[in-house]
Amino acid sequence: MNRNDVKSALGVIAISGGLLGLSAFAVPHIVAYTEMNRQVPEAHVSYEQQHTGKPAVQLASSQIPVLKIEAEAPVSTIQAYLENTVTEEEIKQYNAYAEKLRFMDAPKLTRPMTEQESNRSLILDDQYRFDGLRPKQKLPMKAGNYEFYLDDSKATLVFPKRALTDEELLQFIDWNYRLNYVLSLNYAKPQPDQKDISEAEALGKARESVTRLFGVDLSKMEGKASYNKSGPEQKGVWFVHFQPYRVGALQTQGKPYFMYNVFIDSLSGTVIDSTIVELAYKRTPITAEMNGRIRQDSSWLQAARTIVADKQGDTREIVGTTIIKDSIYDKRGVVAVLVKLKDGSSYTAELRYPEKKLRCLIYTPASPASKS
């Protein structure tokens, strides 16, 4: 990431609603759940509309564990807490710290967090968000009679050689949320206008898409929507993210879980990208030899057609399917199939190798030229 973008990027993540906020174990790194700007490479292997069979498609949701979640969804109180407790002096301190980060490749730490500290921080972060657990004191912002503090003059987090206590981890978590909150005050958040669909509509469309494609019940998952504008035309886009409540506990216990990302055109309300995020999934990179076999196996193309017609429920005529040839997909263990429709629009179905699990479905509307 460009060092000049650190401040604005942190603000964007913070303002997105908490799900994408930095958690204590992740500082100082920013991790994106989804590739915001996908470049679909040119398709090479043609397959005309001559195969009509529709094979069974294994969706990722077929292996989703049943999560035992509270009858009532927990509610985060962080926003109100920060609004009432962050002082003007803190705002100045955090802004000054962020300014120092502009000239650094990354924030400095005297040592990395251990795996044990990271696991404990995940549990504490859940409790901070949903149970109102707070540190007894704030993280010190200068050297003094303490072992864990931020040396503001050097923009360095100083760690003790021993393991951090729960109180110190809570101070770290609290500092992290406070930093993000202050930076969010500097971020001019784009707002949808009357032409855009509402946040509630975006959440509804995202739920419908994920349920339809992956067959999951999202009623017990935490969903957040954020609005942004992208590209030279500054087109409005809703980004919706779903994840289990208390995801930190699941991570610490080593339990598998799934998250879902959905991008929606804010003007038309069209879902343009639905993706399942499976962090524990072990990729199988595709070799040249495997590639050769895949291109001789029409079931990949038929699987993509089945997803578009049966799962997506698109009744428009499919005029062709092609496997997209690109080394990036090979490294990621994904077979990407372009499904072309008669009106000029298309879908890209990304299927996991070798299971043919649906990872992502991307929709590209027909261009104005193709409609004329």
Image: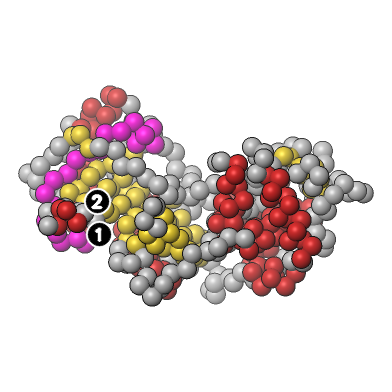
Q: Is residue 74 magenta?
A: no
Task: Inspect the image, locate mark 1, and give the three-letter code of the amino acid beneath it.
Answer: Gln
In the image, farthest residue toward the left: 50
- In the picture, measured across the screen, residue 93 lies left or right of residue 244, that is right
Contact between marks 1 and 2 (CB within 8 A): the answer is yes
**Residue 114 can be seen, yes or no:** no
At x 31%, y 42%, the residue is 40
Rendered image: mark on residue 347: 2
**Quadrant in which the C terminus is drawn:** bottom left
**Residue 313 can be seen, yes or no:** yes
Secondary structure under the numbered disc 1 in the rendered image: loop
- In the picture, measured across the screen, residue 359 lies left or right of residue 319, that is right
Q: Residues within 10 Å of mark 2 (few under 14, many from 20)?
A: many
At x 40%, y 47%, the residue is 37
Secondary structure under the numbered disc 2 in the rendered image: strand
Query: Rounded to the nearest whole Å, what is the CA distance between mark 1 and mark 2?
Result: 10 Å
In the image, farthest residue toward the top: 289
At x 62%, y 51%, the residue is 7
Based on the displayed image, in which of its 4 quarters is residue 79 positioned?
bottom right
Number of numbered labels in the structure image = 2
Residue under label 1, please give it: 312
In x, y percent, where is residue 348? 27, 48
Task: Inspect the image, locate mark 2, and give the three-letter code of the amino acid beneath it.
Answer: Tyr
In x, y percent, where is residue 210? 36, 61
Q: Is residue 327 magenta?
A: yes
Which residue is more in the foreground, 210 or 200? Answer: 200
Range covered by the magenta-colored residues: 312-332
Which residue is more in the foreground, 324 or 277? Answer: 324
In x, y percent, where is residue 349? 28, 48
Rendered image: mark on residue 263: none
